[in-house]
Amino acid sequence: MIGGIAGVLTGVIGSQFTIAGVHPVIAPYSIALAFGAALLTGLFFGTYPASRAAAMRPIQALRFE
């Protein structure tokens, strides 16, 4: 969640600058879309390995360390 907020803030701040004569414009829905994509990615890649590890027996999980 923190990464999503940091990414959205970086994009909003970065859009305030004029680059090669072009002034970027941010559509309001794109902020929610970017934050939602970051949140869903973080949730998936955080919970999927955790659920696999929770299903393993502790001795089997430690064997691979």
Image (cartoon, helix red, strand yellow):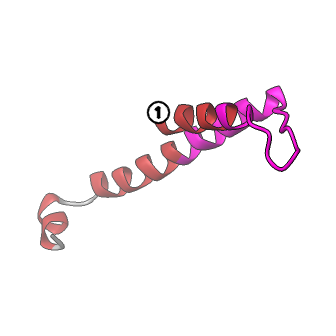
Q: Is residue 20 magenta?
A: yes
Q: Which residues are magenta?
A: 13-41
Residue of label 1: 2
How many numbered marks have been drawn onto this rendered protein structure?
1
Find residue 58 and report its image quarter.
Answer: bottom left
- Residue at the limit of the structure toward the front, as seen here: 21
Placement of 41 over or under 13, stated as above or below = below
Q: Position of residue 26 (x, y in %)?
A: 81, 32
* Side of 7 relative to 24 (left or right): left
What residue is drawn where x is 78% and y is 35%?
30
Q: Residues within 10 Å of mark 1 (few under 14, many from 20)?
A: few
**Which residue is more in the foreground, 14 or 50?**
14
Q: Position of residue 22 (x, y in %)?
A: 88, 44
**Which residue is more in the foreground, 49 or 59?**
49
- Residue at the limit of the structure toward the bottom, as seen here: 64
* Side of 60 relative to 2 (left or right): left
What residue is drawn where x is 74% and y is 36%?
17
Find residue 35 and report its image quarter.
Answer: top right
Q: Position of residue 63 (x, y in %)?
A: 13, 72
Q: Position of residue 7 (x, y in %)?
A: 58, 39
- Residue at the limit of the structure toward the top, as seen here: 28
SS assignment at label 1: helix
Q: Quadrant of the C terminus?
A: bottom left
* Side of 58 relative to 37 (left or right): left
Tell me which amino acid carries mark 1: Ile
Q: Is residue 29 magenta?
A: yes
**Which residue is more in the foreground, 28 or 9?**
9
* Side of 32 relative to 38 (left or right): right
Placement of 27 over or under 54, stated as above or below = above
What residue is drawn where x is 56% and y is 48%?
41
**Which residue is more in the foreground, 47 or 10?**
10
